Amino acid sequence: MDNAAKVPYQAVLTEIDSTEWPTDFDGSKLDLRPFQYHMGKLDPVTVMVKRGTKDNQISSSTYEILRGVKLPNVHPVEIFYDKGYGWLVIPCIDGTLMGWMQSEHGKSMFQGEGDEKQMSQQFRDMLIDICNGLDKLSQKRIFPRKFGIGDIYIKLVSGIPKIRLLLTDVQKKEFSPSNVDFRGKLDDIITKCCEIRSIQLNHLSRQFKWCISADPKNFSWITQSLPDFLKSYPNAWTTREKECYLMNIVSGGHLPWHGVKSRIRGSPNDDLKEKGSPIDWPRNIHGSVIPELLKIIQLGGKWVKNPDDRFDYIHQCRNCYKHFSELPAENQSDLGGSPQGLIAKMEEWDPNIWIKLYHIFGALVRM
C-alpha cells in the first residue's frame, strides 16, 4: 500500500505507523486506520479512514449522499477516496458500541438485582440517540441499505459516551412510513447487546424494546416521532411523573374530552391487547370489581362511577387522587393511605398501567 496518497483539493493523507493504531473500548484493534491529513500550509490533522471490504464496499454515491450532512448522532464523512473497495475519511472516533458492551463499561448498561435486569438510563439514551439519527436521516430521504451494531460507534464528549452512526451504504428514496424500516434492526441490536452481557430484560425494559420494534401502525394516533415518544417512556418514571400523568390525562388539555373517553374505552392498540388485558377496573378471580373500589362507588355523589366503563376507572383514580383528603379514613387506608399510596396501588392492581396509558396517549402535549 502507498504510504502517502493524494486526494482532492491538493490534500494528502499520510498513514500513521500501525503501532499507534487506536484500540476499541474492550482492548481490541479498532476497525479504523489513523492518518494525518495535510492541506496546504495548514497544520496536519489526525483523521481516521473507514475502508470498504469485498463484502461491504463503499461507493462514491454513498459519499455524495452523506457529504455535508450534519445531524446529531450521525458521524460526518469528509472525503471519499477511490482506493481498494472505497475509503471514507472521517473525524476521529473513540470506539464501537460492540466494544463498549464487551468492556467493563457494559456493566453500567443494565441495573437491578435478580435474574432480570432493567436498561439503565444511559443505555436507554443511547438507543434513543440511534433512533434519532435514523429518524433525522429518513426525513432527508436517506436510508441505509444495511444497518447493524457494526455501524454504531461512540465518541466520548467530556467523558460521556455519545452515539455516532457511521454509515457506509445508503440510498435516497421517497419518504413514507413504510420506508422507515429500521425498527426490526434496532430490536436485533438490543438483543445482541443483551447477549453480550448475558442479560435477560425485565418486563418494563421488554416493553421499551417492543415499543422500538413495533409496527408504526400500532401508534398511528400518536403524533410524536419515535425518539420523542421514547424519551418520556414510563418504564423509569418517578412517582411525581405518574401523578402528573394521571391528573393531565383526564383534564382534556391535551385532547378533546370525547377523544380522551374514546381512547380509553376502546384502545386502538390491538397488539397491546394481545400482550395483556386492556385498561379496565381491577377485578377479583370471580370477575367482580375489587372491594376497595366498590366501597368508593358506594359513597355516592361524585364518587359514583360505572364499573363497566374503562374510562370511569381512570376518572375515579384521578378523582380519588385529587380529593384524597375528602375520603373517609377507612377508604384512605384501602387506597394506600395517601395520594402517593394510591399511585402504588394502581401499579399493584396492574403493573403495566402506565405503559398501557402511554401507548394510548403518548407524551401529553397541551393544545
Image: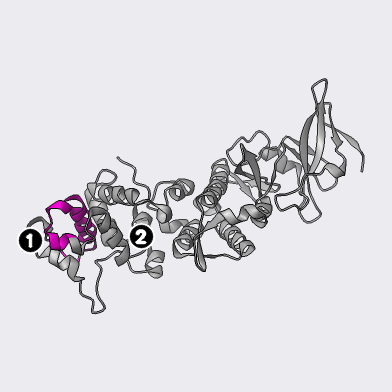
- Residue located farthest toward the left when viewing the structure as drawn: 301
Between the C-alphas of marks 1 and 2, the distance is 29 Å
Question: Between residues 28 and 108, which one lies in front from this camera angle?
Answer: 108
Q: Is residue 291 magenta?
A: no
Q: Is residue 25 left or right of residue 204?
A: right
x, y percent for residue 8: 81, 30
Does the rendering let one see residue 276?
yes
Crowdedness of circle 2 by 10 Å Cα count: few (<14), some, many (20+)? many
Crowdedness of circle 1 by 10 Å Cα count: few (<14), some, many (20+)? few
- Identify the mark at residue 300; answer none if there is no mark: 1
The amino acid marked with disc number 1 is: Gly
x, y percent for residue 205: 48, 60
x, y percent for residue 347: 32, 62
Badge 2 is on which residue? 356
Residue shown at the point (85%, 38%) measured from the top left: 16
Does the rendering let one see residue 147?
no
Q: Is residue 297 left or right of residue 364?
A: left
